[in-house]
Structures are given as structure tokens and as C-alpha cells.
Image (cartoon, coloured by chain):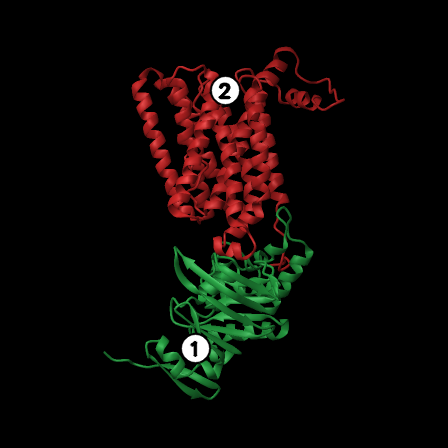
Chain colours: A red, B green
């Protein structure tokens, strides 16, 4: 080995790869659809957004409207949701030192599902679905946290088990509601499978602050997540305030997950396979895994959404179906190629 | 210098340690001996704040800062998969790095020095899972050295090693102590090894300090037997006292 014995963690190369992948995915996502847009013109229109720049080659009329009112918000929402779920997944895997941890681990999915089901079953206006899903997700995780602490003190195992109990309970209530209100089953089912439909920029603007804060907190905690690989006691002996870091990271990741779920429904698989794939390819350090998961999660969901809306056009596939359909074989391929598990 | 002052630990209302007052001076190697469950590990953990306790632990007369003042080596250190030796040793710099910062040139220099001192430079790029037991223990020590703390606490550093490797590891600790002026406190089961390396011994039993002093005054049958079920005999070996097992019959 020619490198110095103590080399700094290499991040730049992988981050550039991730950023380029995301950029290409977004450009393709903006270009393809029922109305094909010229990639060069799409690019020119985007460059025109910069203050004081006018390439003269951008889209006009319908093309411009399609790009900025329909496709751009949707692609950006896909990127934000994908980045949030993958980032939260990597954070959970680091905090719980559990390869099966995903952002729904502590009951956020079941809680959000219950909240949304309630909105549908109570025949509330559809604007209530997202806020109730958000609140449901947070209440469920709050219950998990309190329950986990009350039975098991500080161990993460008790927290995970409490999450299982809370999720089962929320799902039971949800099933009961659905059974009483059979007629909303289809709406609820479609919500649960996840989709990235947008009404202008509303969903994007809702999600941005959560995604940015969670990104800053979790990426900023990357080095401490590395130290936590030694276990709680050894990390604490190295001056890490384990409980505080865990609470901060889980809180940030959970808030962002709840916000993502509330606008997009339950999109599975992104939060678990993207961080694992990144880990297998780019190494163990959370300083690399966390930001790279966000970039690849964003790119992955943009591509998955592209397939969801084009493969059976004009019908749309549920994006959750696409992520698993694409993700499962891809993940198996990565596992086999790298020849080891984490 | 490290001093436990009236330190008392209780789990669920049951007292498991103390109150004990024990001190190890600058550059001294103190051995904590005693039967299983005596409270040796608990005492070490209390020093780095891993268990709640009453009383105070002071390092050089100031209240201790975990990580900066005291390096603690767990009885069963985690050896994370896929991590290289140098990455692992770098974790020892954690107390010196701010929340949002990363390691700098000085941290890398300290780690390179720690690797050098523990003869690990050639293994720096190897992953932890490929190390032998003795090499792994040296990597853990290197991580502790990288902390640059004046006090080193070792919880059974030789428990999983054969006699040859156990002596090798303890010799390394002795070198670190001599060259770096470290204060070392070791919880150690092997009483003969304790006799060979420690300056002074503290016998802990049932959460209390029951004997304390130079090796020769603690390692006697009269002192030890009540706490080891009578199963020890002490003989004079070529380098000092040696403790042998004794059948107690039925």
C-alpha cells in the first residue's frame, strides 16, 4: 500500500460521483414524460434561472409551463423525499447499529398511515391528509420513545421493540377504521403505496425546511456516528454524550421522515437499500455514508418516479412498487458483487 | 494522578461499590485485584462516568473530563468490521475534535506516533478482523495512547490472551508508563501477573477495599484466602510472589 499510514477520510471523490448521478437523474426526469422536452432546452431554461443570465435557447409557452409548473416540482419532490428517506435510514442504522433499521423503524409509518386513514375515513377535506399523517407519525414515535425508555432505560433494543408494539397497535386501529369504512379503502391503499403527485410547489416548500435541518444535523453528526460504532460505553469514554447525540439525530431524522411521508405516502425500500448499497461500495464511515445516501437516495427516487409515470403511461404505477421492483434485484446484485454483508 | 474520593455506586438501590477512597500517584501503576463481582470494573467505569455514582473522581486535583483526562480500555473492546487499524486508532482523537470538526494534521501526527509506539505502523492499513489477539490488544492500547490522557485505566487487558501475549501487552503498558509518565490502573484477575507489573495493589471484595499496599503486603495467604474461598496459596518465585491455585476438596 503506497498511501500514508494515517490518511484522512476520502469524501470528495464519492461526493462528486453522487452529485453527478443526481444531476443526470434529475435532467432525465425533467426531460422525459408524456410531453417530451428537449434536454438542451431544459438545461438552457434552468441556466436562465440564474440572475442576469439569458441564453435565449430556453423553453417557451407550453414547454416552459410543463417544466416549471409540473415536472420540476415533481422531480424536486422526488429528490427531496428520496434524500430524506435514505438519509434518515443511514442515521437510524448508525444510531441503532442495526442493519435492518429503516426510517420507519420507530413506528412513524404506521402512525402516519393511521393519521391519513383517519382523514380519509372521517371524510375530511384532502388538505388534512398530510398534516394528520405528519401528526400521526410523530405521535407514534413519541409513544415509542416514552415506552422504550420506561421499560428498558437506555438500551436501543427496548426502543426497537417498543416501535414494534406501537406499530402493531396503530396498524390494528387503522385496520379497524378501514373495516368500518370500506368505501375509502381504495384511497387509503393508494396513499399507503406512495406517490409523488404535486400541486404546484406546495409539497416541495413544505418538505424543504425539514429536509435541510435533518440533513445538517445528521451529516454534522457523521463523525460521532463513527465513534458510536464502538458501542455506547466506549463512545461515552471518548467524551461522546451518547444519549444527547442519539436523541438529536433520531429527532431530526424522524421529523424529516414524518414530513416526507405526509406528502408522499409510504415509499418503502429507499431508506434501507440505499444506505446499505453506499456502505458496501464506499466503506463504513458515516461521514461518507450519510451525505452519499442522501445524494443517491434522491437520484434513485427520481429515476423510480420517472419509471412510475412513464412505463404504463398514461396510467401511473405506485412508486413504492417501482422502488421495490427495481431496488430488490439491484440490491441482491450489489450484495453478490461485493461478496460480504455488513 | 487519579483519586476516587468516597465513590459509591448503587444499582436499583443495591450498593455494589464503596464508598471507596483510592489514589494512584503520577506515574504509578496500581493493580485492582479481587474476586468476580467485587466491583473492580465498576470502579473503573465510575471514573469515566459510565455508571452513576456518588462522590468524586479527580485527576490531578481537577474534576475529570472523560476522554481527555482518562483513557479507559474496556474488558471486551468493540472491533468494528471493515475498519482499519489507523482509522480505529483515530477514534481515540475524538475527545479533542469539536462536534462539527474533523481531524487535522496534528491528530494524524498523534495517531502516527501512537501506531509507531505500539509497533503497528506496518499494520496501519489492515482491517481489525485480520489481527491476532495480541495485535488487536495493541491496537486498543494505541487508541488509548492517541487520547493523550494522563491516566490509563485497563479493565482486564490480558483476559483473552495466553501467558506470552499477556506479558507482551503488559510490557508495552510498562513502556508507555515509563516513557510517557502515565498513571496506570489495571483491574486484573491474574494475581501473579499483577505482582510482576504493579507498584501497589488494592484488594477489592464485596464492593469494599479490604487491603491496600505494596505487592508483598497484599499478596499473602492470610490476606487473600478469605476472599478467594481459601483456594490460593502464595509461594516465593524467582521474581517475587507467585499465587497458585489450591484444591479445596469437598
> Where is residue A141 shown, x and y percent of the image?
44, 35
User: Looking at the figure, which quarter contains the C terminus of chain B?
Assistant: bottom left
Q: Secondary structure at mark 1?
A: helix
Chain under numbered label 2: A
Q: Give the residue drawn at x 63%, y 39%.
A: A16
Tag 2 residue: A197
Q: Give the residue drawn at x 61%, y 41%.
A: A15
Judging depth in this view, the residue of A37 and A247 nearest the camera is A247
> Where is residue A191 shown, x and y percent of the image?
42, 22
Judging depth in this view, the residue of B238 and B218 nearest the camera is B218
Q: Toward which corner of the image does residue A325 lie, by quadrant?
A: top left
Position of residue A262 relative to residue B139, above or below, is: above
What is the number of the mark on residue B191? 1
> Where is residue A79 shown, x and y percent of the image?
55, 29
Check chain identity for marks 2 and 1: say if they share one. no
Q: Is residue B131 left or right of residue B92?
A: left
Circle 1 crowding by C-alpha within 10 Å: few under 14, some 14–19, many from 20:
many
Position of residue A156 relative to residue A298, above or below, is: below
Q: Is residue A46 left or right of residue B247?
A: right
Amino acid at each position: 500500500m503506497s498511501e500514508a499510514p494515517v490518511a484522512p477520510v476520502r469524501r470528495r471523490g464519492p461526493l462528486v460521483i453522487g452529485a453527478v448521478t443526481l444531476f443526470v437523474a434529475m435532467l432525465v426526469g425533467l426531460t422525459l414524460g408524456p410531453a417530451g422536452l428537449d434536454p438542451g432546452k431544459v438545461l438552457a431554461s434552468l441556466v436562465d434561472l440564474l440572475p442576469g443570465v439569458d441564453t435565449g435557447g430556453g423553453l417557451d409557452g407550453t414547454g416552459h409551463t410543463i417544466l416549471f409548473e409540473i415536472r420540476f416540482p415533481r422531480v424536486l419532490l422526488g429528490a427531496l423525499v428520496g434524500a430524506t428517506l435514505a438519509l434518515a435510514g443511514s442515521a437510524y442504522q448508525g444510531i441503532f447499529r442495526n442493519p435492518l433499521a429503516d426510517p420507519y423503524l420507530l413506528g412513524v409509518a404506521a402512525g402516519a398511515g393511521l393519521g391519513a386513514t383517519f382523514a380519509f375515513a372521517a371524510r375530511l377535506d384532502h388538505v388534512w391528509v398530510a398534516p394528520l399523517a405528519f401528526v400521526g407519525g410523530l405521535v407514534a414515535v413519541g409513544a415509542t420513545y416514552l415506552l422504550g425508555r420506561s421499560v428498558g432505560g437506555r438500551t436501543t433494543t427496548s426502543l426497537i421493540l417498543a416501535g414494534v408494539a406501537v406499530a402493531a397497535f396503530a396498524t390494528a386501529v387503522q385496520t379497524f377504521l378501514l373495516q368500518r369504512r370500506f368505501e375509502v379503502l381504495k384511497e387509503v391503499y393508494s396513499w399507503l403505496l406512495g406517490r409523488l403527485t404535486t400541486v404546484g410547489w406546495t409539497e416541495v416548500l413544505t418538505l424543504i425546511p425539514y429536509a435541510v435541518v435533518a440533513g445538517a444535523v445528521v451529516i454534522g453528526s457523521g463523525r460521532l456516528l463513527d465513534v458510536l460504532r464502538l458501542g455506547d460505553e466506549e463512545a461515552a469514554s471518548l467524551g461522546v454524550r451518547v444519549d444527547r447525540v442519539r436523541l438529536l439525530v433520531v429527532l431530526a431524522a424522524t421529523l424529516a421522515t414524518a414530513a416526507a411521508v405526509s406528502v408522499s405516502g409510504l415509499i418503502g425500500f429507499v431508506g434501507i437499500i440505499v444506505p446499505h448499497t453506499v456502505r458496501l461500495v464506499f466503506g463504513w464511515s458515516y461521514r461518507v455514508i450519510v451525505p452519499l445516501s442522501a445524494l443517491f437516495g434522491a437520484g434513485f427516487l427520481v429515476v423510480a418516479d420517472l419509471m412510475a409515470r412513464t412505463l404504463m403511461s398514461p396510467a401511473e404505477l405506485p412508486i413504492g412498487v417501482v422502488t421495490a421492483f427495481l431496488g430488490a434485484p439491484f440490491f441482491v446484485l450489489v450484495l453478490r458483487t461485493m461478496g460480504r454483508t455488513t | 494522578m487519579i483519586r476516587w474520593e468516597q465513590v459509591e455506586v448503587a444499582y436499583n438501590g443495591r450498593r455494589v461499590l464503596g464508598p471507596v477512597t483510592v489514589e494512584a500517584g503520577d506515574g504509578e501503576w496500581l493493580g485492582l485485584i479481587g474476586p468476580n463481582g467485587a466491583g473492580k470494573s465498576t470502579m473503573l467505569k465510575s471514573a469515566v462516568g459510565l455508571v452513576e455514582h456518588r462522590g468524586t473522581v479527580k485527576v490531578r486535583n481537577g474534576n475529570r473530563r472523560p476522554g481527555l483526562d482518562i483513557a479507559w480500555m474496556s474488558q471486551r473492546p468493540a472491533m468494528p468490521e471493515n475498519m482499519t487499524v489507523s482509522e480505529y486508532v483515530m477514534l481515540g482523537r475524538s475527545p479533542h475534535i469539536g462536534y462539527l470538526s474533523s481531524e487535522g494534521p496534528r491528530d494524524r501526527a498523534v495517531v502516527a506516533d501512537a501506531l509507531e509506539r505500539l509497533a503497528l505502523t506496518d499494520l496501519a492499513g489492515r482491517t481489525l478482523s485480520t489481527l491476532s489477539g495480541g495485535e488487536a490488544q495493541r491496537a486498543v492500547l494505541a487508541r488509548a495512547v492517541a487520547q493523550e490522557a494522563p491516566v490509563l485505566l485497563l479493565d482486564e487487558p490480558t483476559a483473552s490472551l495466553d501467558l506470552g501475549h499477556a506479558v507482551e501487552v503488559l510490557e508495552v503498558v510498562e513502556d508507555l508508563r515509563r516513557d510517557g509518565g502515565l498513571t496506570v490502573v489495571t483491574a486484573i484477575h491474574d494475581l501473579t501477573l499483577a505482582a510482576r507489573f504493579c507498584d501497589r495493589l488494592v484488594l477489592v471484595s464485596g464492593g469494599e477495599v479490604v487491603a491496600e499496599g505494596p505487592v508483598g503486603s497484599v499478596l499473602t495467604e492470610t490476606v487473600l484466602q478469605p476472599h478467594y474461598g481459601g483456594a490460593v496459596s502464595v509461594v516465593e518465585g524467582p521474581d517475587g510472589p507467585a499465587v497458585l491455585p489450591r484444591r479445596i476438596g469437598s
